[in-house]
Amino acid sequence: MNKGTMPVPMIARYNTTPRAALAKPTDLGDTQRMAANLHSALKQLKQLHLKDADWVGFREVRETCTTRSMRDAKPEANSTSTTHGVMVEVLANGQFGYAATPRLDDESLAKAAETARDNAVQASRWAVHPFTAAQRPPVRTNYQSPVVRGLTSISPREMNALLAEICVKLKRSDKIIRTEATSMTIETETSFVSTNGSDANQKVSLVILDFDATAQDGSVVQRRSGGGRGRAHQGGWEQVLADDLWQRVDLVADQVLELVAAEECPSETTSLVLKPDQMMLQIHESIGHPLELDRILGDERNYAGWSFVKLEDFGRLQYGSRLMNVTFDPTVSNEMASYGFDDTGVAATREFLIRDGVLQRGLGSLESQLRSKVPGVANARACSWNRAPIDRMANINLEPGTSSFNEIVSGVERGVLMETNRSWSIDDFRNKFQFGCEYAKLIENGKITRTVRNPNYRGITVPFWSNLKKVGDASTSGVYGTPNCGKGEPNQIIRVGHASPVCLFENIEVFGGA
Amino acid sequence: MIDSVYFEGLTAKLLSQLKEGEHLFINLSGENSQFIRINGAKVRQTGVIQDADLELELLLEKKSEDDGAFTSGGLHKVASSTTLCGLAYEDHERLSAALKRLRAEASQVPADPFAQLPQRLESALDVTSGHLPDVANAPAALLGALEGIDVAGIYAAGEQFRAMSNSAGLTHWFSTKTFSFDYSFYTPSQRAVKGVFAGRDWDRGAFQNSIARSREKLRALEAPARRLDPGSYRVFLEPAAVADFIGMLAWGGVSEAALRQGESPLLKIRRGEATFSPLFNLSEDFSRGDIPRFNSEGELAPKELALICDGKLVHTLVCSRTAAEYGAVSNQADSSEMLRAPSMRGGDLRLEDVLMRLGTGIYISNVHYLNWSDVPGGRVTGMTRYACFWVENGKMIAPIENLRFDDTIYSIFGDALEALTAQCEFMADTGSYGSRNLGGVSVPGMLLSGMKFKL
């Protein structure tokens, strides 16, 4: 493969965040065809006059995921999975019921609608809230990821050769005991039609290219990755096969060898500088999840937990430093969780969640907004056709500040610079957290000095964000994401995006390994 | 409807399409489930899900030749998974198309030196039935007993099936009908008790008893909570908490591949630098029959396999691929080498003696969000959750404000392990990422002389 033909930068920079385009209906090709039977089924359903049903929606999803993986330059996986089915939702007696079916013919969809209606009616005596069709607004929009270099433009043979070459280049030394390289493409097509006029389509394309090396020196074992699966973007191969690929492979090999020779991260309370590939996780766990309205309303408290945020905190709570400006933005081109509408038909818009450190708005669907009387966003999302939508993050981004990277580092007398998340844990109210990173450097007298291994830090959400002292400018920003955010009962894994600049926090407890 | 007859019909048609040098593994996973999500003893969401996925793994046997990029002799392995709809003609069309795509792709990928050909082994048929509430009656059966309680949770019920077949003539089928109600009860001050009521046969009386026990526990949480400073405390872990720690060993802990590749938290044990307590015994135990013994290659795991005996690692989980790569002996582990039916042996601590033996310390019912803070060092962090109490001189004094622990498994399962309860509890796995999980873990409670709390 000629890597010289991959000119697009690896990391989409935050200062170049064009809004994702809404496609014309004719642009979507297969998605239009995929939806054809939904219109027919809806027509048949209307003729049947489904008793007691105040609203019916069909959401068809077809997702194909292709994974290729090499370990130590030998094939581990060449697999493709396709899941395809329809989620039928029915509103009856103020209660939504659902039936998810893999059968796509009109008769089966009508039968599923009856089943969903029956579920709604039987449960409506215990409805958590009386809903109406206003929580399923009509939407007529099409969205598709901007793709330059199509997902099938690289053959299985070419991709296996590339992954093997990455493994070979990572194997720099006998101390490197394991190398791995993985590519993944995901194409998700969604069609949504409803009895109140929704007719909308989305086609999302995602690419991931990840690699890592494990080194051992005596009893010390360390692993360094190229960013993990958080380095995922919407778009085509142009997003990950960039000019700097081989530099990044070399860097991973260099750094894993540095790590096995490094001393443990010191245990002290000090200044902490976080790169965007760790800020991603910090934002996700201590801003994204606590602001989900369904958590605050208690829907999630039997599983992932509750939130320290109360409904009365919106518009009032000083969440952190005045440097904090956080947006919900599913309109950023190439970020992982961009879309045109959510899975209940609400059009996607950019909204401030936190402005100048003050909490403004929750992550809540129209159902959660109705129950909580708190402003929300277009975030009712389901992981596939076989799950109902719940309150989710999309792209949750920390807006850039004004400090250059040099200004941030030069102002630190002593501290630790950490990058790339490797461990995460936070309590069920989203207060006490402990996170770990793959790689860290000491900062001494304003300069980056020695490498340290097993860097971890811990804190409590609001005091931690109150200690945010500098926010990097756009030149320090990176766009990452979390492809495996778990939540909900039944459980769902969903993809979310996080963009952030480099940030400086003061008086943070850092420490090393066992 | 997808059943064993339907599966065998589909696989027979697929296998008849194979050409010379082609070998096939076929794996099916599916469910017909009802879910009722509850908040505040009200229904938040409810519905039914029909889902089944069939994976084809094709091995193309080629003679050795060099095509430039790879030496292409050997077994070229590719896989494809497809949703089944249960209509024979349509499913056959989908699977035939998938097989054609795999055939085209197989010649483009390098040979897998560790791939194993299908074998004709002993077949297994395991069908268990259950008596579940009707879909229509489930809301009433559940919510009728919960009035007046601030409860959140998920009821899941229905049929689950797994099947496997291969081109050597092997077929396995496993199906079961189960229910679970995974719930939490809350006090007005947001303290909670966790419970799981699960099984194959819904028993109204047993359900009401389970609810009554949880309500009784909830009363103890109404006292003002005590805030404890970070430090080391004596601890009793209820079985639910122990299950979460065992869960940390499930992925990559006792895996032979993970140990060989530097990714296991048990590296210190493998190197002979550490052991667990002589009280600690862990095995894989399929005798409960709640999970298939066959793996994705059709191999049947032994009904019981000791992994850690008297604190020493006596066996690891070894799949056929790992066996081929490292010259080890397979014990028919799943290809992920994860624990499928973990079972920990109990000790001699009677439940009525737990508080007295704990003396002064923390009684922990559940833990939350465990993760490694240092994998090779075996250091794990997480939070206390639900009904956790400060105990003084053998008496429960007050619920505690949640604490973050950060300690090594070499202490928790090793030096600090004082006693195990005589009684083990089976904790049903109520997870449902992608689909409802099967099985669970059987564990005792654990008394520890010390556990480090950091925040």
Image (cartoon, helix red, strand yellow):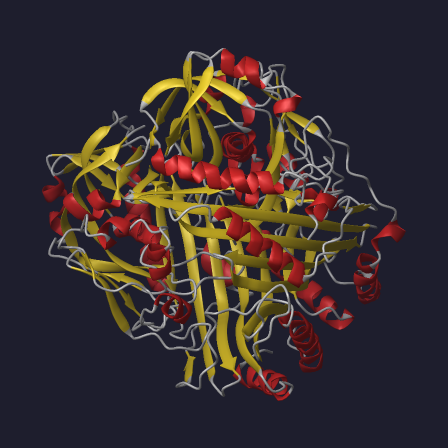
Left or right relative to B247: residue A477: right
Left or right relative to B175: residue B223: left
Q: Which residue occupies the foreground of this view, B170 or A209?
A: A209
Q: Which residue occupies the foreground of this view, A260 or B26?
A: A260
Left or right relative to B232: residue B67: right
Which residue is rendered at x = 14% and y = 37% of the image?
A: B395
| Residue A30 screen position, x and y as percent | 81, 60
| Residue A97 screen position, x and y as percent | 63, 56
Q: Which residue occupies the foreground of this view, A162 or A231?
A: A162
Location of residue A62 (image quadrant): bottom right
Which residue is rendered at x = 36% and y = 65% of the image?
A: B326
> Is residue A77 visible in the rendered structure shown here?
yes
| Residue B41 screen position, x and y as percent | 48, 47
Residue A173 sits above or below residue B64 on the image: above
Please give the count of numbered marks on the rendered protein.
0
Where, quadrant-wise, is the C terminus of chain A in this rendering?
A: top left
Location of residue A440 (image quadrant): top left
| Residue B67 screen position, x and y as percent | 64, 69
Q: Which residue occupies the foreground of this view, A73 or A155?
A: A73
> Is residue A132 visible in the rendered structure shown here?
no
